[in-house]
Amino acid sequence: MEGFEFTYRLKEVSDRFVDQLGEHFYLLADRFDPATLQQHTLFPQEMTWYYGEPLWQRLSNEQKLMLNRLCFCQSYLSTGVAEIAVNVLNMQSALNTILRGSPEVALYMAREVVEEMAHVQAFLKVIERVLNFYGLTFDDLRNANPSLRLAKTYVNGHTILGWLRGDLYYYYFTRFALNVNQKTVERSIIDEQEVHPVVQALLKNHATDEARHMQMSRATGIEALRQMKNPVVRVLACLGYARFAASIFIGRHRRDSRLTRETRIRTLELVGIDRKTAVQAYEQWKNRWNQPEDPALVRAGRQYFLRCNFDYIDDLPVAPWVKKRMKKTIFSAYADLPLPEAPADTAMKPALRGH
Ligand SMILES: [Fe+2]
Ligand SMILES: [Fe+2]
């Protein structure tokens, strides 16, 4: 299948590790015993929602730890749900590809589905045990995370678009932003001292698989765009990507949706904070009243997201004005950061800065 030969190499790597999926994920997660939690965190400390805020200072040590661990649960429940959503689309792509393209490529697409299910199984196992430890149920967590339903919108949208277009190129083109977002959290956890060792090992294993999935998204995205022959469609796809990437965030984000807002507030309520205080704390945190700058780790994560997206855009087969417009859209949601260094087209910088 012309243009997608890079998947053969990715599949070779995957083949070497496929027999260890149990050991790397769900069997490893089985060794997580909440009785050994003690002072361990499960999520990068500085990435814990509300970290460093006046409300954070008022929380007891136990509440800080609980909030940190619930951030892990919410983040990885969202990740698990998103992974199942991309699995639906990966299998649709695999079906299209085995009917019309290369069986080898279809097999690699399906292989990622197998890997994602091992990831989700491991995450759910840890989440369930953490919730048990706090006397919470899965429903409590799910009710505090209304943004989960976006996964269905994502699948339905891409399915309809794929059906209309006859291919899922647009899905692969946009998936890259989701992968970068996921990788950012895991990059941040690698140097954390306090994270529970089983969870840290699990997240490192996940980062390894996802680095490959990210290579798949990046290379497929560029090739998928190339295969969109209509120039108008190509430009629309690019502008759509930029809007999508701008809505994805690490930490607090100018464009938090109503659903994200609710998730942050309700999770704080689970820690024992009353609704009114939780709403106020959210508004202060999100609007940067007390901490205009993010903690160093969050800032580095946001910078990484922006950098990866700008690099991806640089490599897309589209006109310079489209690239400039895409960068401007994404940067407008990340204006708390300096503009990444432009590797080649430095003339773009002043133009972007002005907005
Ligand atoms: Fe995964
Ligand atoms: Fe993945």
Image (cartoon, helix red, strand yellow):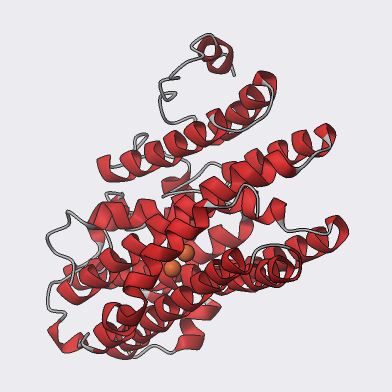
The residue drawn where x is 40% and y is 76% is 119
Left or right, 127 with reference to 43: right
Q: Is residue 237 left or right of residue 130?
A: right
Q: Residue at x 67, y 47 (%)?
A: 224
Q: Quadrant of residue 354?
A: top right
At x 17%, y 72%, the residue is 196
Question: Where does residue 345 sit, x and y in percent of width and height?
Answer: 51, 14
Looking at the image, which is closer to me, 284 or 126?
126
Q: Quadrant of the N terminus?
A: bottom right
Location of residue 161 in the rendering, given as x and y in whole percent from the top left corner:
81, 58
Q: Would you say residue 274 is visible in this rendering? A: no
Vertically, is 159 above or below 272? Answer: above
Q: Nearer the viewer, residue 97 or 230?
A: 97
Quadrant of res 304:
top left
| Coordinates of residue 328 in the picture (x, y in percent) | 60, 26
Q: For residue 47, which quarter of the picture?
A: bottom left
Q: Position of residue 342 (x, y in %)?
A: 45, 19
In this picture, residue 346 sits left or right of residue 211? right
Toward the right, the furthest residue is 164
Q: Nearer the viewer, residue 67 or 320?
A: 320
